[in-house]
Image: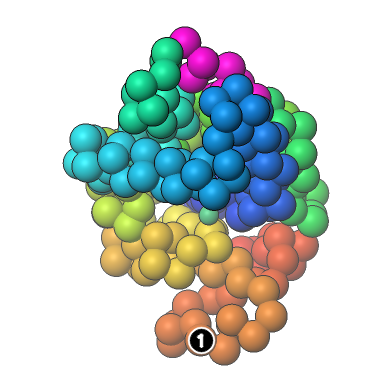
Amino acid sequence: MLKAAIFDVDNTLYDYDAAHAPAYRALSAFACEKLSLTQEAFDELHAAASRMLEAHSGGHCAAIHNRLIRYQLMLESLGQPIALAPAMAELYWGTLLRQMRACPGARESLARIKALGLTVGIGTNMTADWQFSKLERLGLLPYIDFMVSSEEAGAEKPDRRLFDLCVKKAGCDAGECAFIGDSLKGDVLGARNAGLRPVWLCQGSKADTAPSGVLCVQSLDTLPELLASL
Ligand SMILES: [Mg+2]
């Protein structure tokens, strides 16, 4: 019988792609004006800074998600004062938090899963601070019993160390934990490799490509029913 339901955050509990787009636009408009850059130059610089951050940090840790460091690297590459980096990070994150919308049925689904008596956890590739801010802003934090960020685990999904820490915090066997996420490689195959029961949140015909034995849901609305049947 299932004892815990553990969730990815981005593109699982809220639509990251829809919130990232205006946040990136606001950031690039600000930076292009302050630094006299074209949009193209900004995009290239942003991508180069991401690659540089991966190279500096080793690439398999939560530091790769740190936008403040990314913007600091952009400014350093331009020979510009890094004093602008905090304002750039604040603009990006402020816009993203304002634009975020919970996925349909997220709150109701978490409430129903709690009512089933399951422990609810988070397993996420990101630094803890912004994931707390997002969950709080979405009104989902009160439903969460524990959090494992890749910052805490020292490893990024699909590395099983992050899943092992989730299971330890859930206080049950891996086979008694469902892991729900949108990424086939990071969430679904990572969870399966660590012995958890993966549920792939996938829309449309993507479900047809699910590996055998992997459960799929099209939206969070139908998740409590599925988990109750496991
Ligand atoms: Mg995700």
Q: Can residue 141 be seen in this view?
A: no
Q: In this view, does 197 lie above or below 148?
A: below
In-image side of 214 versus 62 (left or right): right
85 in the magenta segment: yes
Type of secondary structure dominating the magenta stretch? helix
- Seen at 52% across and 41% down, the residue is 42
- Seen at 51% across and 86% down, the residue is 209
x and y, in percent, of residue 174 in the image: 35, 56
The residue labelled by disc 1 is 209
Q: In this view, does 125 lie above or below 56?
A: below
x and y, in percent, of residue 106 in the image: 74, 50
- Seen at 68% across and 41% down, the residue is 25
Q: What stretch is highlighted in magenta?
A: 83-93
Question: Which is nearer the eye, 96 or 51?
Answer: 51
Residue 169 occupies quadrant = top left
Residue type, label 1: Thr
Question: Which is nearer the eye, 161 or 169?
Answer: 161
Q: What crowding class fits label 1: few (fewer than 14 Cα within 10 Å), some (14-19), or many (20 or more)?
A: few
In-image side of 104 versus 57 (left or right): right
x and y, in percent, of residue 115 in the image: 72, 46
x and y, in percent, of residue 175 in the image: 38, 62
SS at badge 1: helix
Q: Is residue 129 visible?
A: yes
